[in-house]
Image: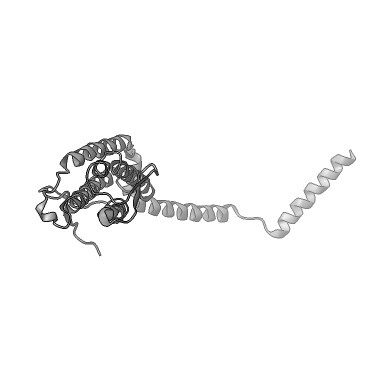
Amino acid sequence: MMTAPRRIDLEENSKVTMTIKTPLYPTFEKRVRDAVEHLVQQQITPWSFLETGHQFSVKQFDGKEISYQGIRFEGSPREVFWSPRYIKPFLEDLCISQISAAVAMAKERDVDAKGLLAELQYMLMNGIRNVYNHMAKTDRLLRGRGYPDKVPLRSVEPEIQVMKRFLEEQIKAEIAMCKPKSPLEEWYKKNMFWVWLISIIVTLFLGIWGQIHVNSIGVPSVDEKSKVNITKIKIKRVFEDF
């Protein structure tokens, strides 16, 4: 049963809304949400245990390990945490991989790629904002040393704007490469049923016409076919003897 399209907020604190049009929206909503949750758990949550005294380690995007023990969240550790080389490569890879998957799946499922990319752009922006908000909360938790409410929340808007520009460039590039369907392809898509029905009717007509034609000219019986074949053999032997 068909349901009315839902409307969703594109970004936090945004008055802009968007009607979901593509059938792949739920698929990529889950893909992006799962990827963001995994990124937060793997790259941000572990920092919360930096000052417990135990060995702390996480890996950068290039595989290099960041390791600390018995150190406070100030100076070098905090600089590493907020370095563009730490979380930004993960977010860039998230954007590129999901955009690539969206283009491929849209082509495979015959879904409007431009519409899906527009939806994906907002999903990814919400995910990016979510990641940086988690970082800001983790930063305040560590600096507050048990009293995070007494420490101001670090602004993450500059980092979000950098990623927003990166994402916009990627989306625009993919949309520019989307080839529109030819008028013939669009017409065929809209009229597939009638094309199929006409082909069936034509096939039936040709079959009936062929049967009528055969009956009108007559078909030689089996005996008549045998006599013709015997006559051909005799004529061939005459020429061979000659």
Q: Which quadrant of the figure contains the C terminus?
A: top right
In the rendered image, the vertical position of residue 71 relative to residue 180, given as above or below: below
x and y, in percent, of residue 84 in the image: 27, 38
Residue 117 is drawn in which quadrant? top left
Which residue: 32% across, 46% down?
94
x and y, in percent, of residue 138 in the image: 21, 52
Number of labels in the image equals: 0
In the rendered image, the vertical position of residue 185 relative to residue 8, given as above or below: above
Q: Which colour scheme is used?
A: one colour
Residue 6 is drawn in which quadrant? bottom left
Q: Is residue 54 visible?
A: yes
Q: Which of 208 and 187 is in front in this view?
A: 187
Q: Which of 24 and 61 is in front in this view?
A: 61
Which residue: 43% across, 54% down?
200
Q: Which quadrant of the figure contains the N terminus?
A: bottom left
Answer left or right for 162 relative to 177. Answer: left
Answer left or right for 136 relative to 174. Answer: left
Extreme right residue here?
Answer: 241
In the rendered image, the vertical position of residue 193 relative to residue 85, given as above or below: below
x and y, in percent, of residue 137 in the image: 18, 52
Q: Can residue 29 be seen in this view?
A: no
Which residue: 34% across, 49% down?
58
Q: Which of 78 and 104 is in front in this view?
A: 78
Q: Which of 71 and 63 is in front in this view?
A: 71
